[in-house]
Image: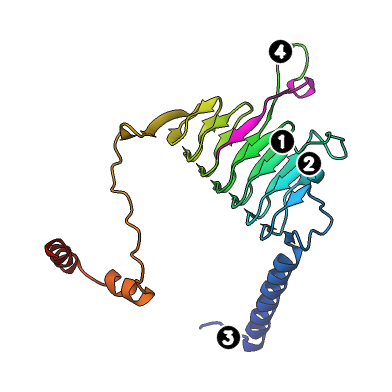
Amino acid sequence: MPRSRNTFSSWRRALAQRAVHAVWAWAQRTGSVTAERPGRLRFGAMGTGTRLAFPLGTVFGEPWIHLGAHCIIGEQVTLTAGLMPDLDLGPHPILRIGDGVVLGRGSHVIADTTVTIGSDCYFGPYVYVTSTNHSYDDPRQPIGKQWPRMEPVEIGSGCWIGTGAVILPGARIGRNVVVAAGAVVRGEVPDHAVVAGAPARVVRRWTPEDGWQPPLRTPAPVPIPDGVTPEQLLALSDLDDEAVSRLAELDAEA
């Protein structure tokens, strides 16, 4: 025999679920941090249109953190300047993030000394950037009690940092660099390169003389022509291979 359904109980659960979702959406909107609504946080600079999503990660040393305009800082992202809260770090910013930067959910940027992230960089979730590393010189002392080593980190503009990548102290990453998911980067990376592995190494690079080497395995994406409507794009998505081939022939003839 099928169990009898308690309609009233199901209705109450559905109503409670909708209420919880509505309250959480309200909390996300209200708890997010912007230049107009900074809450308890007082960043050294925060550009127009920048938003830190709620719930926040660990944030301290805000006076020495400068955020550019139109940045998206995902949920649970940690941003810190200095080894611990309430330190006087001097007159200059420690962590600088340019305009249009996206930091994916759960990422960490730990700036115990200078960390600079250029404009229009996109970070996947759970990326870890740090200017500090543990030292282990003294074999008699626990590693956690030995004074750490610090080196500045610089990430050029236009980079894409894949999910779970780790950027170590002293890394200097050029412009328009792709860091593969899970890569561990140290040292210098040239402009227009793709790096992967642990430790990361250059697996592809672009130069004006040779283009991409090794050559790209897929053709570069073609921008959508001006004036194409969403309805036209939907119609194209319904075409079969034969129709697409015929359209290509007609385009070549034209």
Left or right: residue 188 compared with residue 87: left
* Residue 123's disc number: none
Residue at 79% from the left image edge and 47% from the top image edge: 44
Pointers 4 and 1 in contact (C-beta within 8 Å): no
Q: In which quarter of the image is the C terminus?
A: bottom left
Q: Mark 4 points at which residue?
A: 137
- Residue 191, relative to residue 102: is it above or below? above
Asked whether residue 208 is in view, the answer is yes
Query: Marks 3/1: CA distance?
Result: 59 Å
Give the SS element for disc 3.
loop
Give the residue drawn at x 29%, y 75%: 235
What kind of element bears circle 2? helix
Q: Which of 17 and 100 is in front in this view?
A: 100
Whole-Å distance between the Cαs marked 1 and 2?
10 Å
Numbered disc in front, either 3 or 1: 1
- Residue 111: mark in rendering: 1
Label 1: state its secondary structure: strand
For residue 6, which quarter of the picture?
bottom right
First in sequence, mark 3 or 1: give its number: 3
Q: Which of marks 2 and 4 is nearer the N terminus?
A: 2
Residue at image x 14%, y 66%? Answer: 250
Q: Mark 2 points at which residue?
A: 64
Q: Mark 4 or 1, which is nearer the eye?
A: 1
Specify start and end residues of the magenta stretch as a single range.
143-156
